[in-house]
Image (cartoon, helix red, strand yellow):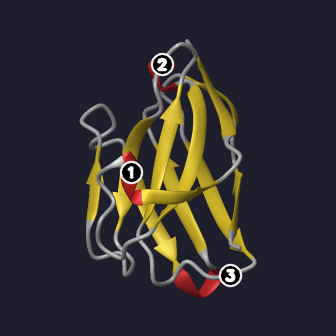
Amino acid sequence: QVQLIENGGGLVQAGGSARLSCMASGGTIESFAMGWFRQAPGNERELVGGISWNGDTTLYADSVKGRFTISRDNRRSTVYLQMNSLKPEDTAVYYCAESKYSTRFASRDDYTIWGQGTQVTVSS
């Protein structure tokens, strides 16, 4: 069973940048689409963005479009989330997830494996 381990969270000032990584252990992610989600207190878990198995296709939530970038390195079984121009409203626990499909990643229902989450706090 693949396990996903996120790293890179922490405290960041508004306007700053952070890079999250998600490494798979116990298997590979190369055949599957991947996604990043986030959940703030009192809110539902929402899709931040997703990437197809080969990295050719990505999508982003409107709230992060132009500021966040998802990428992947299948040789390292790792997915990244580069976050720029961070805002206090980006504060949340960020989760990495693996889709059960190679090119479907727009719906939370597409995902079957989840990481434990990493906290990102953006101070104003």
Amino acid at the residue labelled 3: Gly
Amino acid at the residue labelled 1: Asp
| Residue at the extreme bottom | 75
| Residue 79 in the image, given as x and y percentages of width and height | 54, 66
Q: CA distance from mark 2 to mark 3?
A: 31 Å
Picture residue at 47% right of the left edge, 32% below the top? 45
| Residue 123 in the image, given as x and y percentages of width and height | 61, 16
Badge 1 vs badge 3, beta-carbon distance below 8 Å: no
Where disc 2 sits, the SS reads loop
Amino acid at the residue labelled 2: Asn
Number of disc labels: 3
- Front disc: 1 or 3: 1
Instruction: Please state, as top left, top right, bottom left or bottom right, where the C terminus lies in the image.
Output: top right
Q: Earlier in the sequence, mark 1 or mark 3?
A: 3
Q: CA distance from mark 1 to mark 3?
A: 21 Å
Picture residue at 37% right of the left edge, 57% below the top? 50
> Badge 3, how many Cα within 10 Å: few under 14, some, many 20+?
few
Badge 2 vs badge 3, beta-carbon distance below 8 Å: no
Where disc 1 sits, the SS reads helix
Q: Quadrant of residue 77?
A: bottom right
Q: Which mark is residue 109?
A: 1
Give the residue at mark 2: 43
| Residue 105 in the image, given as x and y percentages of width and height | 33, 60
Q: Is residue 101 left or right of residue 34?
A: left
Give the residue at mark 3: 27
